[in-house]
């Protein structure tokens, strides 16, 4: 009798433990049976317990009418590299400028990983997704979990308007979860049609109540190379968290405006390790080389864009920009950029108004010209590494605040870079607030960059008291209010710096 009671208790305890180990669905988004769903939606599940992502099984989406497989995420494929690729001494710059073709390339008509330049095929086995028409593709996380919530990231541009879909999830995709086996458990129908092509204002809302659920979805909808400002688009991003890797190219005359700077967060865990450049191609020094894939948010070969009132952030360390922009006449107002080394890469003419930039070192990297007006920059290492040529100006700062987060936070550096240097690099500080900046001002400067233009005028501390500049390096010249008045006036003029009409 006693043995029977003990066995019964053990069985009950075992059942309780098994039940507790089962992770169940509390909420689906889109809800089962939902209609009017955006075609760029992510699929979100809120579970009863914290989520552990598995390494087996698949997430599959089917067309409910035809039963055809629309998309599949194989969880046995690693998301992306976790270690830096070996250095290749034989790598060369692309022999011809990279061509930004304007064509409709998606995961549906092109195999992700197809080289778009002269680089070789990447044969490594990682998740790949064509984003923004870039056929080489990006490594990505098919599922991202935070606590009890998991978000499923389908390959881009796989869903159609006015279609019904159902989702199947294999056991093993989520730890302790038996999956979804029935065609009836998770079904949804997309919106009947796309936004009117004559409308020039689009709304992005993470809750699915806008024209699009993601910034990428809106940018994919907008045509390339719009000819005039009158035909431009205005994208309103509602307050919310947008965990997505954003990449678009060939866009012109588009305004991306958040509801509020602190309320709109666009972020993703990306860096040079996770999305490296091709091992056989050099990048970064010559225009027209292979585009970088390492930023959380990238506007590539884009001009006449306006960004307002939002935050962009990378969730990774290393060479990891929050924002990377290539193009001309791009304007940024009240933007918060969070990255590491480098936080911001700006190649081409940019105006920055009332922006905040937070980084780990080489926080601002680029080839200019960039005009910074009333911006706040924080950095743990050098604030910038400027690489402009004599063809244009570099980085000009007017009434900006530099806040060093360590004793290594010099204003910039110009060391030899694998045999290269930047003899025409230019940095000008006018009426800036300096906080915790070493007395030398700048860090190491290679011999070939001794000719760089490094100018400073009226730097002061947070109380408005003049900074003692007697310890500045010889290459950093202090401007005189009378003798250099004309030069100060020129550098204070954004049109003169940026060469904008």
Image (spheres, rainbow, N blue to C red):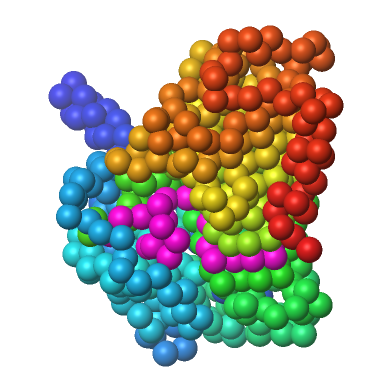
Residue at left offset 70%, top offset 80%: 227
Magenta residue check for 298: yes
Magenta stretch secondary structure, dominant: loop
Quarter where residue 415 is shown: top left
Which sits in the foreground, 212 or 358? 358
Q: How many marks?
A: 0
Which sits in the foreground, 216 or 419? 419
Q: Position of residue 468 (x, y in %)?
A: 68, 9
Q: Is residue 242 left or right of residue 50?
A: right
Q: Which residues are magenta?
A: 281-309
Residue at left offset 77%, top offset 12%: 466
Quarter where residue 49 is shown: top left
Which sits in the foreground, 5 or 106? 106
Regarding residue 188, the answer to whether it shows in the image is yes
Height in image: 123 above or below 111?
above
Q: Is residue 444 left or right of residue 211?
A: left
Q: Position of residue 408 (x, y in %)?
A: 48, 18
Magenta residue check for 380: no
Location of the C terminus (image quadrant): bottom right
Residue at left offset 26%, top offset 43%: 84
């Amino acid at each position: 009798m006693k043995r029977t009671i003990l066995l019964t208790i053990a069985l009950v305890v075992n059942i309780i433990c098994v039940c507790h180990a089962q992770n169940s669905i509390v909420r689906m988004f889109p809800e089962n049976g939902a209609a009017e769903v955006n075609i760029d939606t992510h699929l979100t599940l809120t579970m009863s317990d914290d989520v552990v992502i598995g390494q087996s099984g698949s997430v599959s989406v089917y067309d409910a009418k035809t039963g055809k497989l629309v998309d599949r995420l194989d969880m046995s494929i690693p998301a992306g590299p976790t270690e830096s690729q070996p250095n290749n001494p034989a790598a060369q710059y692309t022999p011809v400028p990279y061509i930004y073709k304007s064509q409709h390339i998606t995961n549906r008509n092109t195999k992700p990983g197809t080289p778009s330049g002269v680089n070789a095929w990447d044969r490594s086995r990682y998740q790949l997704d064509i984003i923004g028409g870039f056929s080489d593709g990006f490594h990505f996380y098919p599922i991202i979990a935070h606590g009890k919530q998991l978000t499923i990231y389908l390959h881009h541009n796989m869903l159609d308007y006015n279609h019904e879909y159902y989702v199947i999830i294999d056991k093993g995709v989520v730890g302790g979860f038996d999956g979804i086996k029935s065609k009836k458990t998770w079904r949804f129908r997309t919106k009947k049609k796309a936004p009117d092509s004559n409308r020039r204002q689009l709304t992005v809302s993470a809750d699915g109540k806008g024209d699009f659920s993601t910034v990428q979805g809106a940018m994919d909808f907008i045509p390339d190379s719009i000819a005039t400002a009158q035909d431009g688009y205005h994208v309103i991003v509602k307050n919310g968290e947008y965990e997505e890797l954003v990449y678009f190219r060939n866009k012109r005359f588009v305004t991306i405006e958040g509801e509020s700077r602190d309320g709109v967060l666009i972020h993703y865990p990306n860096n040079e390790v996770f999305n490296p450049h091709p091992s056989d191609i050099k990048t970064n020094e010559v225009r027209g080389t292979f585009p970088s894939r390492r930023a959380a948010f990238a506007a590539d070969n884009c001009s006449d864009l306006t960004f307002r009132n939002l935050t962009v952030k990378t969730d990774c360390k290393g060479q990891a920009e929050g924002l990377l922009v290539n193009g001309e006449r791009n304007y940024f107002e009240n933007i918060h950029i969070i990255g590491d080394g480098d936080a911001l890469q700006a190649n081409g003419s940019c105006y920055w108004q009332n922006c905040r930039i937070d980084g780990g070192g080489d926080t601002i990297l680029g080839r200019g010209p960039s005009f910074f007006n009333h911006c706040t920059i924080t950095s743990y290492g050098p604030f910038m590494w400027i690489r402009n040529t004599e063809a244009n100006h570099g980085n000009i700062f007017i009434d900006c605040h530099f806040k060093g987060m360590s004793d290594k936070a010099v204003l910039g550096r110009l060391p030899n870079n694998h045999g290269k240097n930047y003899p025409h690099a230019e940095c000008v500080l006018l009426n800036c607030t300096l906080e915790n900046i070493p007395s030398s001002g700048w860090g190491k400067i290679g011999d070939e960059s001794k000719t760089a233009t490094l100018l400073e005028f009226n730097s002061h501390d947070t109380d408005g008291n003049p900074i003692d500049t007697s310890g500045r390096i010889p290459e950093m010249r202090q401007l005189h209010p009378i003798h250099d008045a004309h030069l100060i006036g020129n550098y204070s003029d954004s049109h003169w710096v940026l060469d904008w009409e």
